[in-house]
Image (cartoon, rainbow, N blue to C red):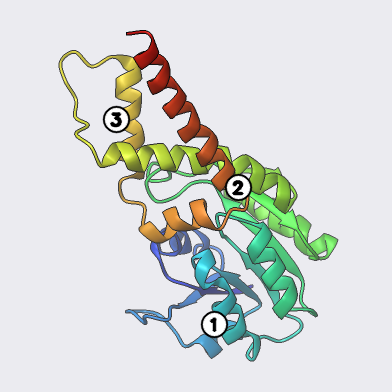
Amino acid sequence: MRVGVIGYGQFAQFAIPLVSKLSEVIAYDIAGGEGTKTLQEVCSTDLVVFAVPAQAFDAACAAAQQFIQPTTLIADISSVKVGPIAMMRKYFLNNEILGTHPIFGPQSGKDGIVGLPIVLFNVSWTESHYAACKDFLGGTLKLHVIEQSAEQHDKEMARVQGLTHFIGRALGSIDMTAYPTSTKSYTHLLELVELLKNDSWDLFRTIQMENPYAENVRKEFLAELHDLEEKLKRDV
């Protein structure tokens, strides 16, 4: 199977070499770049994977629509699922569609991806195509495959990713350094900052602004911080 990837950001550059061991993979990026192909070339493959930020997803689908044939398999790797899946359904009515979210990246997967989680939501892939995909991801790559609806995924990710990245980015903006007196809990916070420090603003914005459930989780967290501060003041 020939695979075309639309978007050549950090994750695509990390993941393509892993897949290229078994399939021919070519990539397109609106910004160009060494080794990338044209959009038409990428859309002529058997499987087209959208690897663009959620805020650019609609434009990417619209641009690719003219080149993609009805027999082409469509998938995405966005950090949110509700919006991108709705857009794929809108633009590719006659294609088989699969939503995925690899819940890891270049930093967390730098020492290997065996056992790391990936979420799948099969919108319309045939049973045979979907079974082959699960066998590749879970059997060949040895990822931990989790099957979820788009809504359940986004509800969970609002806390699992949204809250974690919100706290981690805030901590990364203040003076966080190791001390001789560092406790285990403080060291875990340092590890969180280290893990997220190279994540792009586009990824952060996608996680926070494109997930329909993330805003309420942030508000809940910020309200609790405010209540804690007020409680401390009352106890003085």
Residue 195 found in image quarter = top left
Label placed on residue 188? none
Q: Residue at 73% across / 68% down in the picture?
A: 97
Q: Position of residue 231 (x, y in %)?
A: 42, 16
Q: Could you say which is closer to the camera, residue 233 or residue 24?
A: 233
83 vs 107, left or right, is right
Q: Position of residue 5 (x, y in %)?
A: 53, 73
Residue carrying label 1: 42
Above or below, 17 against 218 in this view is: below
44 vs 222, left or right, is right
Q: For the residue labelled by badge 2, is the local secondary structure a helix, a strand or a loop?
A: strand
Q: Which circle's residue, 3 or 1, is located before the other in the chain?
A: 1
Residue carrying label 2: 118
Q: Could you say which is closer to the camera, residue 214 or residue 52?
A: 214
Above or below, 207 against 93 in this view is: above
| Amino acid at circle 3 | Leu
Q: Residue at 47% across / 59% down in the picture?
A: 15
Query: Callout 2: 10 Å neighbours few (<14), some, many (20+)?
Result: some
